Image (cartoon, rainbow, N blue to C red):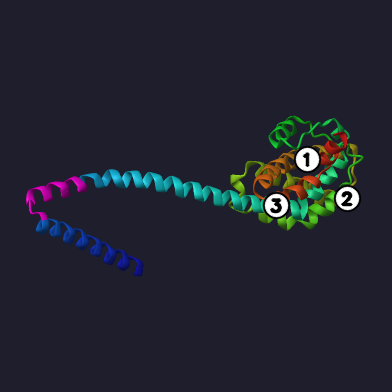
Amino acid sequence: MKNSHKIAFISVILLLSSIFMFFLHYLVFGQFSNTIYYAMMSICGIPLNILAVSLVFENLINYNNKQQRLSKVNMLVSLFFSEAGYEILSIFTNADGDIDSMKLNFDDLQEVKNKMLKFKHKINFEMLDFEQLRNILITNRDVITDLMGNEYITEHGAMSDLLMSLMHLRDEALISKDKELTDAYKAHLKNDCERVYEHISILWVEHLIHLKKNYPYQYILSRNSCKFYTEAQEKA
Protein backbone atom coordinates (compact mmCIF):
# COMPACT_ATOMS: atom_id res chain seq x y z
CA MET A 1 0.00 0.00 0.00
CA LYS A 2 2.84 2.37 0.83
CA ASN A 3 4.42 1.69 -2.55
CA SER A 4 1.13 2.53 -4.31
CA HIS A 5 0.94 5.89 -2.55
CA LYS A 6 4.57 6.57 -3.32
CA ILE A 7 4.13 5.78 -7.02
CA ALA A 8 1.00 7.92 -7.21
CA PHE A 9 2.79 10.83 -5.52
CA ILE A 10 5.78 10.61 -7.88
CA SER A 11 3.44 10.38 -10.89
CA VAL A 12 1.58 13.53 -9.85
CA ILE A 13 4.86 15.40 -9.31
CA LEU A 14 6.18 14.38 -12.75
CA LEU A 15 2.88 15.29 -14.45
CA LEU A 16 2.77 18.71 -12.77
CA SER A 17 6.43 19.28 -13.65
CA SER A 18 5.71 18.52 -17.31
CA ILE A 19 2.71 20.90 -17.36
CA PHE A 20 4.77 23.62 -15.67
CA MET A 21 7.59 23.28 -18.22
CA PHE A 22 5.19 23.49 -21.16
CA PHE A 23 3.55 26.56 -19.58
CA LEU A 24 6.97 28.14 -19.01
CA HIS A 25 7.87 27.43 -22.62
CA TYR A 26 4.70 29.21 -23.75
CA LEU A 27 5.37 32.22 -21.52
CA VAL A 28 8.91 32.62 -22.84
CA PHE A 29 8.41 31.87 -26.54
CA GLY A 30 4.69 32.36 -27.09
CA GLN A 31 3.38 30.46 -30.12
CA PHE A 32 0.70 28.48 -28.34
CA SER A 33 -0.12 26.37 -31.38
CA ASN A 34 3.54 25.34 -31.88
CA THR A 35 3.87 24.48 -28.20
CA ILE A 36 0.79 22.24 -28.40
CA TYR A 37 2.05 20.73 -31.68
CA TYR A 38 5.43 19.70 -30.27
CA ALA A 39 3.83 18.53 -27.03
CA MET A 40 1.55 16.22 -29.00
CA MET A 41 4.52 15.00 -31.06
CA SER A 42 6.33 14.10 -27.85
CA ILE A 43 3.28 12.30 -26.51
CA CYS A 44 2.91 10.35 -29.78
CA GLY A 45 6.46 9.08 -29.40
CA ILE A 46 5.95 7.81 -25.85
CA PRO A 47 4.55 4.35 -26.81
CA LEU A 48 7.55 3.68 -29.07
CA ASN A 49 9.95 4.83 -26.36
CA ILE A 50 8.23 2.60 -23.83
CA LEU A 51 8.40 -0.35 -26.23
CA ALA A 52 12.11 0.15 -26.92
CA VAL A 53 13.00 0.63 -23.26
CA SER A 54 10.85 -2.36 -22.21
CA LEU A 55 12.53 -4.68 -24.72
CA VAL A 56 16.01 -3.59 -23.69
CA PHE A 57 15.31 -3.83 -19.96
CA GLU A 58 13.45 -7.11 -20.30
CA ASN A 59 16.41 -8.69 -22.11
CA LEU A 60 18.82 -7.31 -19.52
CA ILE A 61 16.68 -8.57 -16.65
CA ASN A 62 16.28 -12.01 -18.26
CA TYR A 63 20.01 -12.21 -18.89
CA ASN A 64 20.84 -11.22 -15.31
CA ASN A 65 18.30 -13.70 -13.93
CA LYS A 66 19.74 -16.46 -16.10
CA GLN A 67 23.28 -15.67 -14.96
CA GLN A 68 22.18 -15.68 -11.32
CA ARG A 69 20.45 -19.04 -11.76
CA LEU A 70 23.50 -20.53 -13.49
CA SER A 71 25.72 -19.22 -10.72
CA LYS A 72 23.53 -20.88 -8.08
CA VAL A 73 23.42 -24.15 -10.04
CA ASN A 74 27.20 -24.19 -10.36
CA MET A 75 27.49 -23.60 -6.61
CA LEU A 76 25.30 -26.66 -6.06
CA VAL A 77 27.44 -28.69 -8.47
CA SER A 78 30.55 -27.64 -6.51
CA LEU A 79 28.82 -28.66 -3.29
CA PHE A 80 27.98 -32.07 -4.73
CA PHE A 81 31.55 -32.76 -5.85
CA SER A 82 32.97 -31.58 -2.53
CA GLU A 83 30.60 -33.76 -0.51
CA ALA A 84 30.61 -36.93 -2.59
CA GLY A 85 31.26 -36.43 -6.30
CA TYR A 86 35.06 -36.63 -6.31
CA GLU A 87 35.03 -39.82 -4.22
CA ILE A 88 32.42 -41.47 -6.42
CA LEU A 89 34.27 -40.52 -9.59
CA SER A 90 37.53 -41.83 -8.13
CA ILE A 91 35.95 -45.20 -7.30
CA PHE A 92 34.68 -45.59 -10.86
CA THR A 93 37.90 -44.53 -12.57
CA ASN A 94 39.86 -46.98 -10.41
CA ALA A 95 37.64 -49.76 -11.78
CA ASP A 96 37.93 -48.63 -15.40
CA GLY A 97 40.51 -50.72 -17.25
CA ASP A 98 40.12 -48.68 -20.44
CA ILE A 99 40.95 -45.31 -18.95
CA ASP A 100 44.50 -45.61 -20.30
CA SER A 101 43.10 -45.33 -23.82
CA MET A 102 41.94 -41.78 -23.20
CA LYS A 103 44.19 -39.19 -24.79
CA LEU A 104 43.08 -35.93 -23.27
CA ASN A 105 44.49 -32.46 -23.71
CA PHE A 106 43.30 -30.39 -20.77
CA ASP A 107 44.42 -27.19 -22.48
CA ASP A 108 41.29 -27.62 -24.62
CA LEU A 109 38.43 -28.55 -22.29
CA GLN A 110 35.84 -28.50 -25.06
CA GLU A 111 37.80 -31.22 -26.83
CA VAL A 112 37.98 -33.12 -23.53
CA LYS A 113 34.20 -32.88 -23.22
CA ASN A 114 33.68 -34.13 -26.78
CA LYS A 115 35.93 -37.13 -26.13
CA MET A 116 34.22 -37.81 -22.83
CA LEU A 117 30.84 -37.89 -24.58
CA LYS A 118 32.16 -40.54 -26.99
CA PHE A 119 34.06 -42.54 -24.38
CA LYS A 120 32.57 -45.90 -23.41
CA HIS A 121 32.30 -45.69 -19.64
CA LYS A 122 32.81 -49.34 -18.74
CA ILE A 123 33.91 -50.70 -15.39
CA ASN A 124 35.18 -54.03 -14.13
CA PHE A 125 32.80 -54.80 -11.29
CA GLU A 126 35.36 -57.09 -9.64
CA MET A 127 37.74 -54.12 -9.43
CA LEU A 128 35.02 -51.84 -8.08
CA ASP A 129 35.04 -51.10 -4.36
CA PHE A 130 31.27 -51.42 -4.13
CA GLU A 131 31.28 -51.45 -0.34
CA GLN A 132 32.97 -48.03 -0.24
CA LEU A 133 30.61 -46.78 -2.93
CA ARG A 134 27.63 -47.99 -0.92
CA ASN A 135 28.87 -46.22 2.20
CA ILE A 136 29.33 -42.94 0.32
CA LEU A 137 25.86 -43.14 -1.21
CA ILE A 138 24.20 -43.96 2.11
CA THR A 139 26.17 -41.34 4.04
CA ASN A 140 25.28 -38.65 1.48
CA ARG A 141 21.72 -39.72 0.73
CA ASP A 142 20.34 -36.52 2.27
CA VAL A 143 22.66 -34.44 0.09
CA ILE A 144 21.43 -36.23 -3.02
CA THR A 145 17.78 -35.86 -1.99
CA ASP A 146 18.16 -32.15 -1.13
CA LEU A 147 19.87 -31.44 -4.44
CA MET A 148 17.17 -33.30 -6.34
CA GLY A 149 14.51 -31.14 -4.67
CA ASN A 150 16.28 -27.87 -5.52
CA GLU A 151 14.40 -25.83 -8.13
CA TYR A 152 17.58 -24.70 -9.87
CA ILE A 153 18.81 -28.23 -10.60
CA THR A 154 16.11 -28.79 -13.23
CA GLU A 155 17.83 -26.15 -15.36
CA HIS A 156 21.04 -28.19 -15.50
CA GLY A 157 20.48 -31.23 -17.71
CA ALA A 158 23.70 -33.07 -16.84
CA MET A 159 23.18 -32.62 -13.11
CA SER A 160 19.54 -33.73 -13.28
CA ASP A 161 20.48 -36.88 -15.21
CA LEU A 162 23.24 -37.66 -12.72
CA LEU A 163 21.03 -37.21 -9.67
CA MET A 164 18.30 -39.43 -11.14
CA SER A 165 20.78 -42.23 -11.82
CA LEU A 166 22.43 -41.70 -8.42
CA MET A 167 19.11 -41.98 -6.60
CA HIS A 168 18.46 -45.29 -8.32
CA LEU A 169 21.95 -46.57 -7.52
CA ARG A 170 21.56 -45.40 -3.92
CA ASP A 171 18.32 -47.38 -3.61
CA GLU A 172 20.02 -50.44 -5.10
CA ALA A 173 22.91 -50.03 -2.67
CA LEU A 174 20.47 -49.98 0.26
CA ILE A 175 18.60 -53.03 -1.00
CA SER A 176 21.80 -54.99 -1.68
CA LYS A 177 23.24 -54.32 1.77
CA ASP A 178 21.82 -57.55 3.20
CA LYS A 179 21.50 -59.37 -0.09
CA GLU A 180 23.76 -61.88 -1.78
CA LEU A 181 25.37 -60.44 -4.90
CA THR A 182 24.72 -63.09 -7.53
CA ASP A 183 26.28 -62.81 -10.98
CA ALA A 184 22.98 -61.59 -12.40
CA TYR A 185 22.61 -58.97 -9.68
CA LYS A 186 26.23 -57.87 -10.16
CA ALA A 187 25.51 -57.39 -13.86
CA HIS A 188 22.51 -55.23 -12.95
CA LEU A 189 24.56 -53.16 -10.49
CA LYS A 190 27.32 -52.84 -13.07
CA ASN A 191 24.88 -51.27 -15.54
CA ASP A 192 23.63 -48.87 -12.86
CA CYS A 193 27.20 -47.91 -11.94
CA GLU A 194 28.20 -47.34 -15.55
CA ARG A 195 25.21 -45.05 -16.05
CA VAL A 196 26.28 -42.96 -13.07
CA TYR A 197 29.91 -43.11 -14.20
CA GLU A 198 29.05 -41.63 -17.58
CA HIS A 199 26.90 -38.83 -16.17
CA ILE A 200 29.36 -37.86 -13.44
CA SER A 201 32.33 -37.83 -15.85
CA ILE A 202 30.56 -35.48 -18.26
CA LEU A 203 29.36 -33.26 -15.41
CA TRP A 204 32.92 -33.11 -14.06
CA VAL A 205 34.25 -31.80 -17.40
CA GLU A 206 31.42 -29.26 -17.70
CA HIS A 207 32.21 -28.11 -14.18
CA LEU A 208 35.89 -27.79 -15.09
CA ILE A 209 34.95 -25.48 -17.97
CA HIS A 210 32.98 -23.28 -15.57
CA LEU A 211 35.71 -23.25 -12.92
CA LYS A 212 38.51 -22.49 -15.36
CA LYS A 213 36.63 -19.43 -16.58
CA ASN A 214 35.44 -18.12 -13.21
CA TYR A 215 37.47 -19.71 -10.40
CA PRO A 216 40.93 -20.77 -11.64
CA TYR A 217 42.16 -21.72 -8.15
CA GLN A 218 39.27 -24.17 -7.72
CA TYR A 219 39.75 -25.44 -11.26
CA ILE A 220 43.23 -26.76 -10.51
CA LEU A 221 42.01 -28.66 -7.45
CA SER A 222 39.03 -30.15 -9.28
CA ARG A 223 41.10 -31.09 -12.31
CA ASN A 224 43.82 -32.79 -10.27
CA SER A 225 41.30 -34.79 -8.26
CA CYS A 226 40.42 -37.13 -11.11
CA LYS A 227 42.33 -40.05 -12.60
CA PHE A 228 41.36 -38.89 -16.09
CA TYR A 229 43.71 -35.94 -15.63
CA THR A 230 46.40 -38.01 -13.87
CA GLU A 231 46.53 -40.58 -16.67
CA ALA A 232 46.59 -37.85 -19.32
CA GLN A 233 49.53 -36.13 -17.61
CA GLU A 234 51.46 -39.38 -17.27
CA LYS A 235 51.12 -40.04 -20.98
CA ALA A 236 52.22 -36.50 -21.78
Q: Magenta part of the protein: which range? A: 29-43
Q: Residue 76: where, in percent of width, then height?
A: 66, 53
Q: Residue 195's image quarter?
A: top right
Q: CA distance from mark 2 to mark 1?
A: 16 Å
| Above/below status of 13 relative to 63 | below
Q: Are marks 2 and 1 in contact (CB under 8 Å)?
A: no
Magenta span contains residue 150 = no
Image height of 232 relative to 44, above or below:
above
Could you say which is closer to the camera, residue 66 or residue 219? 219
Q: Describe the element under mark 1 as helix, strand or loop.
A: helix
Horizontal side of residue 62 vs 180, given as left or right: left
Distance from Cα at disc 3 to Cα at disc 1: 17 Å
For the residue pair 196 and 79, the one nearer the viewer reads as 79
Q: Secondary structure at mark 2?
A: helix
Assess whether residue 41 is covered by the magenta stretch: yes
Who's the residue at 55% across and 48% down the image?
Answer: 67
Amino acid type for the residue under numbered disc 2: Glu
Residues packed near mark 2 inside 10 Å, few (<14), some (14 to 19) or many (20 plus): few
Work out whether mark 3 precedes mark 1 in sequence or the reverse, and give the earlier one.
3
Contact, CB < 8 Å: mark 3 with mark 2?
no
Q: Residue 173: give x, y in percent of width and height.
A: 81, 49
User: Is any atom of residue 1 visible in this view?
Assistant: no
Residue ID for mark 3: 78
Residue type of the residue flagged with mark 1: Tyr
Which residue is the extreme one toward the front?
A: 28
Q: Specify the amino acid type for callout 3.
A: Ser
Choose between 181 and 91: the one closer to the eye.
91
Q: Residue at x 72, y 58 (%)?
A: 142
